[in-house]
Image (cartoon, grey):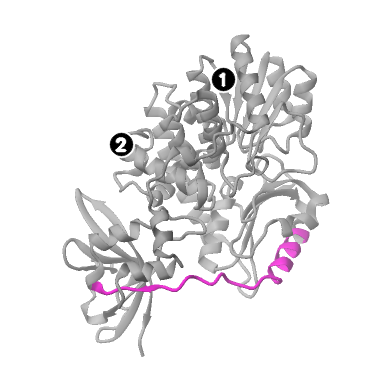
């Protein structure tokens, strides 16, 4: 076989020059600074004036990880500028998504002079118009799809209006805006902006890739201490941040029906001394989330013959997106999971997930007149509709799925010899990272003899190799590969730490036995 580097270059269609550019040291100087954005400059002036006049400032966020990161960045930034901002994270179940008219009335009654909406706002026309009538200024930092009519905010900072080359998160936009406000690169803000890129599944290219690469470097320099307890001692990379840190942050807004998620803003912005309660909250909510999602998945019924995966679940509506993601990955189909609304009886909340040639707008657009609310991105969207429109939504979703080409064609697995599973080659693989959406970690294929495979006492594949390496899998169990038979196992390489011991694992995901 060719050297591993040559195989990786071919896999990613990279020249040596392209590879050199890919692994070049990231720099803050290449990130957007917003100095050419009139809207951002107007927002900066308004914030300066509000601080000088000692106006009450409120940061109004969202209950997911992106919204919490964006709110934390703005609270940290405003505090550094001398303000004492209040902040509010709405409850998914009590307030719904975005700024409601009821909450706008409460804000005006409490005497706030400036409201900064992050990860929401572009679709909140009526509430923002009300605030304007009451003399309350608003600034919006949002990345959701722009509606036909924009709310009358003082300033709107949006990736599309900034002309950025790729979609980014609200947290990343908040970090870019913080650079303009502070005149420097706050390292903790940068890490939170990068975390939000992972949590909202933004394309891993351009500015998104640069910001995440910088954040991983900052972690190694000792920044981002607030996230480390969430990793449970695992190695810090984009995978562990996504699966553990982001998952725990998201869990709070998904399973708590109150406003507990607001506690996380003080923790991540480093403006609150309390570290114990937020960490306990995230860990407890994660345990609840796992239990409820597993139960929901076990009870879900799908039509195996349908082109798309449509399901109705009694799971908490905040978990419908996670369930839709699981279904999409497991079934290899675009997914829509609908749940009865906890907050509004007689209505349903649905999460739509897709990839490849899927576009959620093609599902939503024909239903616009029947939807109570909607929003999201091409591959991830949420809709709310009346109970009696469930059949209509199902027909629209499955009808669109029938027009698609089918399953996404995966990149071919890269052949790998067992002797190549070593730390030197792992470092070569990592030089192509960070990995994410539209830049997936490479999948490898190793040839094995069934007689050489070893299993754990519980029957899971766990075969030791040389120099603290092993083949490990929860998906491949004893008996699936016959002894004396040749097989090809597909999987990915990952570092792990268990009881103080570090190992390089080939995490096997599937196997094909030769006849």
User: Is the residue 391 above or below the residue 25 in the image?
Assistant: below
Residue 221 tag number: 2
What is the tally of numbered marks visible in this picture? 2
Most foreground residue, 67 or 287: 67
For numbered disc 2, what is the local secondary structure? loop
Determine if residue 451 is in view.
yes
User: Is the residue 51 above or below the residue 198 in the image?
Assistant: above
User: Is the residue 22 above or below the residue 219 in the image?
Assistant: below
For numbered disc 1, what is the local secondary structure? strand
Residue 32 placement, left or right of 484: right
Measured as percent of width and height from the top left, residue 432 is found at 38, 58
Magenta-highlighted residues: 392-418
Tell me which residue sits at (36%, 38%) in the image: 218
Measured as percent of width and height from the top left, residue 204 is found at 49, 53
Question: Residue beneath label 1, please?
Answer: 86
Q: What's the distance in space between the residues labelled 2 and 1, CA to CA?
A: 31 Å
Q: In which quadrant of the rendered view does residue 310 lie?
A: bottom right
Measured as percent of width and height from the top left, residue 454 is found at 22, 72
In the rendered image, residue 415 lying in the magenta stretch gets the answer: yes
């Amino acid at each position: 076989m060719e050297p591993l580097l040559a195989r990786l270059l071919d896999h990613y269609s990279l020249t040596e020059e392209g590879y050199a550019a890919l692994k070049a040291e990231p720099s803050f100087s290449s990130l957007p600074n917003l100095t050419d954005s009139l809207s951002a400059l107007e927002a900066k002036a308004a914030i300066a004036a509000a601080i000088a006049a000692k106006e009450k400032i409120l940061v109004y966020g969202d209950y997911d990880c992106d919204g919490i990161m964006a709110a934390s960045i703005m609270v940290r930034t405003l505090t550094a500028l001398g303000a004492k901002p209040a902040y509010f994270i709405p409850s998914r179940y009590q307030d719904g998504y975005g700024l409601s008219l009821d909450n706008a009335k409460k804000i005006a009654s409490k005497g706030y002079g400036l409201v900064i909406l992050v990860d929401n706002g572009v679709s909140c026309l009526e509430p923002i118009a009300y605030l304007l009538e009451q003399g309350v200024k608003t600034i919006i930092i949002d990345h959701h799809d722009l509606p036909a009519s924009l709310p009358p905010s003082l300033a709107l900072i949006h990736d599309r209006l900034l002309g950025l080359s790729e979609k980014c998160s609200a947290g990343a936009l908040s970090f870019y805006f913080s650079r303009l406000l502070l005149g420097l690169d706050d390292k903790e803000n940068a890490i939170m902006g990068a975390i939000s890129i992972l949590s909202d599944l933004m394309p891993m290219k351009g500015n998104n890739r640069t910001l995440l690469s910088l954040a991983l470097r900052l972690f190694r320099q000792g920044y981002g201490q607030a996230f480390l307890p969430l990793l449970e001692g695992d190695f810090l990379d984009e995978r562990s941040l996504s699966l553990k840190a982001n998952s725990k942050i998201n869990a709070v807004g998904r399973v708590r029906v109150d406003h507990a998620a607001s506690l996380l803003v003080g923790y991540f912005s480093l403006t609150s001394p309390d570290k114990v309660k937020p960490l306990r909250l995230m860990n407890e909510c994660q345990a609840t989330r796992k239990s409820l999602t597993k139960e929901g998945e076990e009870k879900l019924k799908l039509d195996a013959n349908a082109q798309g995966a449509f399901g109705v679940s009694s799971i908490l509506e905040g978990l419908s997106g996670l369930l839709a993601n699981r279904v999409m990955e497991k079934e290899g189909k675009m997914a829509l999971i609908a749940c009865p609304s906890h907050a509004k009886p007689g209505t349903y909340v649905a999460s739509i997930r897709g990839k490849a040639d899927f576009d959620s707008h093609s599902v939503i657009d024909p239903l616009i007149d029947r939807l109570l609310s909607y929003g999201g991105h091409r591959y991830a969207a949420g809709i709310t509709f009346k109970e009696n429109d469930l059949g209509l939504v199902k027909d629209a979703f499955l009808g669109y799925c029938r027009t698609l080409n089918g399953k996404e064609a995966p990149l071919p697995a890269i052949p790998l010899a067992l002797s190549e599973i070593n730390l030197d080659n792992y470092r070569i693989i990592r030089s192509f990272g960070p990995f994410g959406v539209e830049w997936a970690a490479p999948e490898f294929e190793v040839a094995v003899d069934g007689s050489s495979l070893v299993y754990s006492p519980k029957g899971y594949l766990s075969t030791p190799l040389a120099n603290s390496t092993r083949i490990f899998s929860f998906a491949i169990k004893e008996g699936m590969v016959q002894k004396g038979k040749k097989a090809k196992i597909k999987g990915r390489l990952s570092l792990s730490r268990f009881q103080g011991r570090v190992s390089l694992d080939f995490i096997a995901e599937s196997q094909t036995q030769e006849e």
